[in-house]
Amino acid sequence: MFDFDVAVIGGGPGGYVAAIKAAQAGLKTAIVEKENFGGTCLNVGCIPTKALVKSVQVLETAKKAAEFGIEGIDPKSVRVSMEKLQARKNAVVKQLVGGVNALLRANKATVIEGTASLVDANTFAVNGKKKYTAKNIILATGSESVMPGFIQYEGDTNIITSTEGLSLSQIPESMTIIGGGVIGVEFAYVYASLGTKVTIVELMKTILPMVDEEIAKLATKTLQKIGVTFHTGCGVKKISGNKVIFDENGKDNFVESQYTLMAVGRAPFTKGLNVEGIGIEFDRRAIKVDSHMRTNIPNIYAIGDVNGRSMLAHTASREAEIAVENILGRPEEMNYDTIPSCIYMEPEIAAVGLTEQQAKEKYGKIKVGKFPMSANGKSLIEGDKSGMMKVILDAEYNQILGVHMFAVHATDMIAEIVAAMNLEATAEEIIASVHPHPTVSEAVGEAFMAAYDKAIHSL
């Protein structure tokens, strides 16, 4: 007899969703969390970052008030209170963390506070003391910031991670960001907008190397306009005090700044979990799982960042649903092909599916449709006419292969494409769907029409 039908270790967007879904299905469920519910995403990731993004967007709107016919606001007199900005961010986080706690208790999941470690396939200990048993265990312990070992560290460095970067009490004069991925770009946007002199040092030839190349170039230009400096194709060699020393075209170069923000990615967190001790297999640093989210031990599942498949909060939540369905005896497999990705700056970036280069390599002949946001009425109303919509289709069957957005509200609009791709909708069906006017979403239909050279509002 087990204490629980399901025990979830970790309370992030994968863990708490798994616990709620299991409890709703009538399974006796426990969830173990050592800190606050919501994980990295809610506490030191997605939510607080976007709260800061919103604050700087309001700042930019205030500075441009005259463009909207609002007088009496001197752009030079607009000030930022970091204390109040941080207070608002913290209030948003606190409310959402409280909401997760309430949801777990309302669904009658047993909440256990502490650090869990596995004893065997059906047993775990909390804080090294009390032991519990569970028929099924779901591991959802998340990830941690990476501090690269190939970089030399010398002297009293000023390195911070994204966690510290979210809670600075004063606006830095300067900041060097190592890594031009999603984390690096979002922090660059926030702090450059606040007036910080920001420099990004990126190993790859472009920032956002996972993004469609054309969209990444537009994002680069947008960030340059607010003062961000880039050193791409540069490998960091050493951090010495306030200096970041890197190789640029075969020669040493350096940037000196008040802070160095490390944004080279995250790694699965399994410290103290004893996964190796009970024989769970790894794929590099990540826990190895199949398409059902099972590890090599059939009753143990791993979801979210800890399995390394797709380090996104919404991926973790979907993996949670998949794991619970399989525990309930309703076999279901995870599909990563239509997982959307979002980057929060102004304009926003959102994408799902293949990039143009990936589509060419896989399918050969493709159709590409583009629509400039400068031709979209709602974008002009919003005061942001930069950006574009880009769609990629299979040339033979008009299958939607990928959609890439660089537009205001892009992160909200991408869900339409995710649903369409999951339903295997064709380009013609998107075109036949009426997009309300005036909305930014009209650009979606226009981009699909452009793939056939039939866009209405662009040449």
Image (cartoon, helix red, strand yellow):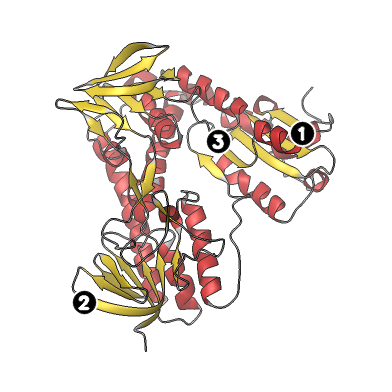
Checking the image for residue 130, the label placed there is 2
The picture places residue 195, in percent across and down from the top left corner, at 33, 22
Checking the image for residue 228, the label placed there is none
Which residue corresponds to the image point at 33% horizontal and 53% vertical from the top-left? Answer: 269
Q: Report crowding for label 2: few under 14, some 14 to 19, many 20 or more residues within 10 A (C-alpha).
A: few
Task: Please indicate, yes or no, whether residue 440 appears anywhere in the rendered image.
Answer: no
Amino acid type indicated by mark 2: Lys
| Image: 270 above or below 370 | below
Do the residues bearing badges 3 and 2 touch, measured as CB atoms within 8 Å? no
The tag earlier along the polypeptide, 3 or 2, is 2
| Residue hosting label 3 | 349
Disc 3/disc 1 C-alpha distance (Å): 26 Å
In the picture, residue 7 is in which quadrant? bottom left
Task: Please indicate, yes or no, whether residue 152 appears anywhere in the rendered image.
Answer: yes
Looking at this view, is 272 or 321 the one in front?
272
Amino acid type indicated by mark 1: Gly
Looking at this view, is 147 or 402 the one in front?
147
| Image: 98 above or below 197 | below
The tag earlier along the polypeptide, 2 or 1, is 2
The tag earlier along the polypeptide, 3 or 1, is 3
| Residue hosting label 1 | 364
Amino acid type indicated by mark 3: Ile
In the picture, residue 58 is in which quadrant? top left
Q: Secondary structure at mark 3?
A: strand
Q: Nearer the viewer, mark 3 or mark 1?
A: 1
Disc 3/disc 2 C-alpha distance (Å): 46 Å
In the picture, residue 105 is in which quadrant? bottom left
Disc 2/disc 1 C-alpha distance (Å): 58 Å
